[in-house]
Amino acid sequence: MLAAVLLATALAYANSLRNPFTTDDRHIILKNFQPWQNWTLGDLFTRSLFSTSPSESSYFRPLTLLTFALNYPLAGPNPSGYRAVNIGIHLLVVALIALLAAQLVGRWVAIFSALLYALHPVHVQAVSYISSRSDLLYTALALLCLLLWIKGSHSQGTRKNLYCSSALCVFFLGLFAKENIVVIPAIVLAMDFIWDGGASWRSKMKSNIGWYVGFAALFSVYFLIRLGAGFPLSMEGGREFALGLRIPFALRIFTLYVGLILYPAHLSLFRVVPVPEGFFEWQVIFGALLLIGMLAAAWYLRQSHKEISFGLLWYLVSAAPIVNLTLLNAPMMEHWLYFPLIGLTLALVSAVRTIAEKVGEVRGAALGFIFLALLLSARTISRNAEWGDLTRLFSRDVSHYPGNWRAWSWLGDALKTEGRLNEAIRAYRNSLSLNPKQAPTWVALAEALSVAGHDDEAERIFAAAVVARPREPWFWYLLGIHRLKVGQYQKAIEPLEKSIELQSSPMAYHALASTYLRLGQKEKAEEAFHKAILMYPGQSKFHSGVHIDLGKLYLRQGKPKEAREEWQIALRFEPNNAKTRELLAKQAK
């Protein structure tokens, strides 16, 4: 049965393999792991997940970065390779859910819990959005930790010590995938409280007190490592409102999350959630009643229906970090539900099984779950298909949430990728009107303006960006490329050299070499070409590709002579490149 669940899950996500990279994917993967950057293991602990792009929040995810670093040599710039790994981790999570639930509540509940969880469309954002791999990783490690803890609870002596020590090690490792795994000790406490093994829960917890302290000690070590690497413990939300409104805001989000789980019709990467003015709004009141009801049900059922009680407590504990009691970088994100939904699914399936047994309709309940799984899988497949057309996807998002600046910015990125520059410029301007304090979007706007021929405005924005973020090599590089394109060769040298000083790259060396050639400084040009090749040897296609792209940039600017010069340089690195010869032949006509 588990094999059938895994097969159904793989089929539901198969159509996501051909989807393109999103904005964050390109920053985290394509810019982070270019092979000439020579990452070391130590770099994983000192660089943010967005190490090459300025980020308002610090993402300390060394283990997640390590998986991308290992993924890059195999997949390169092909998004399907990263999505295949995400799907593989999702399948592992589903298998671990089935194994964990089988240990706690039996095979029937385990299989159907795994089935409904695996195919729920809210998980598309966690699985198909490559950048959210951290949720997949920490969930897999959290489930493994709980399985080891259960094994330890059923063992004595050396075996107990071995299992519990392994559980602590897995928990510690999971912290470096994503800090949300910090909820595991509370879930362990809930498990020990509910499944006391026939003894008093007090005596069981007393016997495990040393292991509980171990969880706290390991988190303290993680905390010190994080602070030592220069990362704060909490995210910066990018918005502020009165502390007294955070509780009603959290209750509203709690309501919205439950509604999203029960009715996943409208899914979005971007949401706008208004801050309530007080406690007397229906979503806030409903959230409070729902929270109280779940807590009461968990307490009332703790002895008669342990699995329902435990599932509810799992959801409540793991949802606490995602409801913005401490302000996060977004009000809601679907991939944040990836771990909490395990508990709610377990509680739901267990409750239905209990009712079905009382009325003698266990088979009917199974058929009902299969039908529900079919509906969920249909929505999952359609949602994966929606991610295949990013312009259409983000256009829909901005129509639903016109006040979300990220949605407008990502729409601009999608439009720019399609060459729809004027529309991209409008999208970027809308984003910046909502939040002018976002340097990456200013630079993206300047790129679009430069390609569209609005050179003076592009120059002003690029110049302002490097003043605002002087340690960002990518911004300096783009300023240099812009000046090279408009013929300001002497002025292009400084930003390109500054980019190389901050972080050497063969692209910057190639651009610098092109600049020197146009200034007639052939020796300096040859030196820059040589350094580019030394940084990334044996990759003639890459080196020629830089100049093919520069030529296309010139051509869009209406400079065919400069375009031909770049393509002739491309042939120097790859003489038999048919694409380059075709471009030159077209220009000759």
Image (cartoon, rainbow, N blue to C red):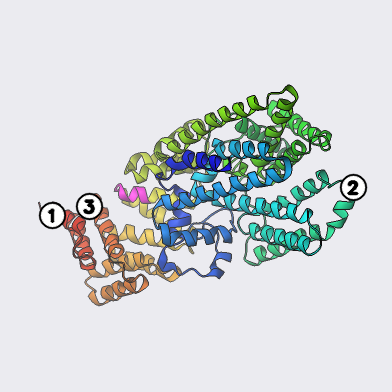
Residue drawn at (53%, 30%) of the image:
374
User: Circle 2: is it few (<14), some (14-19), or many (20+) Cα within 10 Å?
Assistant: few
| Residue at image point 48% right, 68% down | 39
Give the number of the mark in front: 2 or 1: 2
Earlier sequence position, callout 2 versus callout 1: 2
Front label number (2 vs 3): 2
Task: From this view, report whether residue 348 is shown above or below residue 524.
Answer: above
Tell me the element at label 3: helix
The residue at which mark 2 appears reads as 200
Q: How many marks?
A: 3
Left or right: residue 168 compared with residue 46: right
Return the residue nearer the eye: 388 or 207.
207
- Say which amino acid is labelled 2: Ser
Q: Is residue 281 above or below residue 524?
A: above
Q: Mark 3 highlights which residue?
A: 555
Element at label 1: helix
* Residue at the spot of label 1: 585
Mark 3 against mark 1, which lies toward the viewer? 1
Does residue 98 show up magenta in the picture? no
Farthest-out residue, top:
359
Read off the magenta span: 447-453
Q: Answer above or below: position of 235 versus 428.
A: below
